[in-house]
Amino acid sequence: MERMETLSQDLESLDLFSQDQDHFASSIFADAEQLGFDTEGRIALPTLWKEHTGCMEEIAFVGRGSTFQIWNPQGFAEHQAQARETLRQQQGSLKRPVDKN
């Protein structure tokens, strides 16, 4: 809920009648749902989310730091392979620049 409240506050910084505000509100909040847990701690994804991800039987929860994404497992495997190849080619690194002061 805190994440949604932060996003809502960010959305309020945009012009109320702008296309950007409308697009963000439609994309982020229109289909948002608070999910409940069953007695074993599992969640049931709404059908709309399953259809959107193409995940009717199997899903992949993919960590993204403080958030996660829900993917079709095959789609994520392809995305991950491409991301790794891009980083390899660009010699990507999470190292912070050395402070010269």
Image (tube, helix red, strand yellow):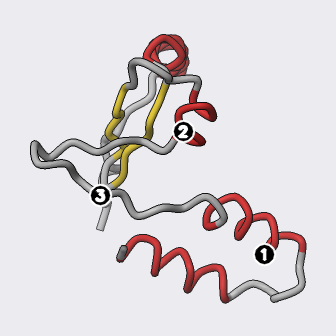
Task: Name the N-terminal-most of marks 3 and 2.
Answer: 3
Mark identifier at residue 47: 2
Mark identifier at residue 39: none
**Residue at 10% across, 42% down:** 40
43 displayed left or right of 73 = left
Q: Residue type at mark 3?
A: Gly
Q: Residue 58: percent from the left, percent from the top?
A: 39, 19
Count neighbours of disc 3 (C-alpha within 10 A) and say few if under 14, some if 14 to 19, many if 20 or more: few
Circle 2 sits in a helix, a strand or a loop, which is it?
helix
Q: Residue 9: percent from the left, percent from the top?
A: 55, 86
**Residue at 45% across, 22% down:** 91
Q: Residue 5: percent from the left, percent from the top?
A: 46, 80
Viewer-closest of 34 and 61: 34
14 displayed left or right of 47 = right
**Residue at 51% across, 21% down:** 83
Query: Which quadrant of the rendered structure holds the C terminus?
Result: bottom left
Circle 3 sits in a helix, a strand or a loop, which is it?
loop
**Residue at 53% across, 33% down:** 50
Q: CA distance from mark 1 to mark 2?
A: 26 Å
Residue hosting label 1: 21
